[in-house]
Image (cartoon, helix red, strand yellow):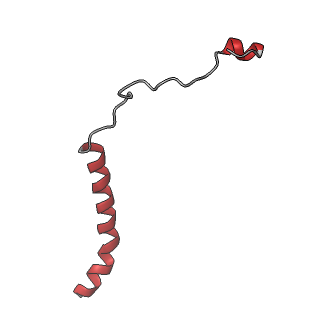
Amino acid sequence: MYALILPASTPFVLLATVMALSWWEDHILPAPPSEPAESPAEGPFRNSASAASGTAP
């Protein structure tokens, strides 16, 4: 009889494990920062006025 309990309960144990890990991720782990710590560096882009006229800066 006990040999039938293990295969029958395996899906429920796996489901409970996934749900517990999901809860743990939502409530225990720290949330990622909403804003970046520092502003990203600006790249060497041409401004829109010189790009529209076709001249190099």
In the rendered view of the protein, which quadrant contains the N terminus?
Answer: bottom left
Q: Is residue 35 left or right of residue 57?
A: left
Height in image: 40 above or below 1? above
Q: Name the residue at 33% across, 59% down.
A: 18
- Figure quadrant of residue 36: top left
Seen in the picture, residue 53 relative to 14 is either above or below; the reply is: above
Q: Residue at x 77, y 16 (%)?
A: 54
Q: How many marks?
A: 0
Q: Position of residue 41 (x, y in %)?
A: 47, 25
Name the side, left or right, on which 9 lies relative to 50.
left
Q: Nearer the viewer, residue 56 or 42?
A: 56
Q: Relative to 10, does residue 3 appear above or below in the rendering?
A: below
- Residue furthest to the front in view is 56
| Quarter of the figure with the C terminus | top right
The residue lying at 31 percent from left, 56 percent from top is: 19
**Occupied quadrant, residue 47:** top right
Say above or below: 22 vs 36: below
Q: Position of residue 29 (x, y in %)?
A: 26, 44
- Residue 42 at x, y percent in the picture: 51, 23
Tell which of 38 and 12 is nearer to you: 38
In the displayed structure image, the side of residue 36 where residue 54 appears, left or right: right
Query: x, y (%) of residue 5?
Result: 26, 80
Query: Which of the 4 quarters of the picture holds residue 7?
Result: bottom left
